[in-house]
Image (spheres, rainbow, N blue to C red):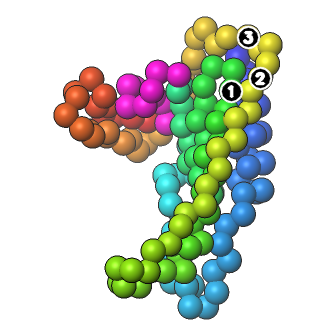
Amino acid sequence: MKTILISIFCVLSVLNSLVAQPKLNDDHSHHKHVHGKTKSSLLENKGQWPAPVLFQSSIEGGKVWIQQNKFVYHLQDYSAMHDNHGNFDSDAGFEIKEKLVHLNFVGSNQISAIEKNDESSFYFNYFKGNDPSKWASNVH
C-alpha cells in the first residue's frame, strides 16, 4: 500500500511541473488564481462522484481522478478564458481546450483497503441536485 501512495505522490509531483499554464503578461498580472482546489490534496469520494473514483485531486491545469488500477487526468487549458476575462460582450465566445488521459496499471493488484492519514484541516460539501444519495459533506 505504501508503494501505491508513494507512486501517486510522485506522479502528482511530476504532473504539477509538466502541465502547461497560460503565460500571464502584465495585463493579467492581477489574475493569478488557480482554477481548482488546493494543489496536491487528495479528496476522498464519499458518494459525490461515480463509484469507480476513489480520490480526486486538483493539479495545475486540471484534475486527476484516482480509480482502481488507473489514473484519469483531465487536463484543461484556461488561457482563452483568461484572455477574455472582463469581456462582457455576449457574442465573444471562447473555447476551453481539454484532454482526458487514462493511465492504466495493467496487471496491478486491486486496492482492498485504504488507509487515510493526515486529514486536511479543510473540507468540502457537495450538495448538487435533488438526490440526497449523491450529496456528501465533510469531504477531506
Q: Which residue is mark 3?
A: 109
- Residue at image position (49%, 36%) is 43
Q: Position of residue 138 (x, y in %)?
A: 34, 34
Q: Is residue 74 left or right of residue 30?
A: right
- CA–CA distance between discs 3 and 1? 11 Å
Q: Position of residue 7 (x, y in %)?
A: 76, 31
Along the viewing direction, whichever of 7 and 47 lies nearer the viewer: 47
> Is 80 inside the magenta-drawn segment?
no
The quarter holding residue 133 reads top left
Tell me whether circle 2 and circle 1 mark residues in contact (CB < 8 Å).
Answer: yes
Q: Which residue is mark 1?
A: 70
- CA–CA distance between discs 2 and 1? 6 Å
Q: Looking at the image, tell me whether mark 3 or mark 1 is earlier in sequence order.
A: 1
Q: Which residue is mark 2?
A: 105
Q: Which residues are magenta?
A: 42-52
Along the viewing direction, whichever of 72 and 127 lies nearer the viewer: 72
Q: Identity of the amino acid at label 2?
A: Phe
Element assignment for label 3: loop
The quarter holding residue 102 reads top right
Q: Quadrant of the C terminus?
A: top left
Q: Is residue 9 left or right of residue 131?
A: right
- Residue at image position (54%, 80%) is 83
Q: Looking at the image, tell me whether mark 2 or mark 1 is earlier in sequence order.
A: 1
> Is 45 inside the magenta-drawn segment?
yes
Question: Marks 3 and 2: which is nearer the front?
Answer: 2
Q: Identity of the amino acid at label 1?
A: Lys
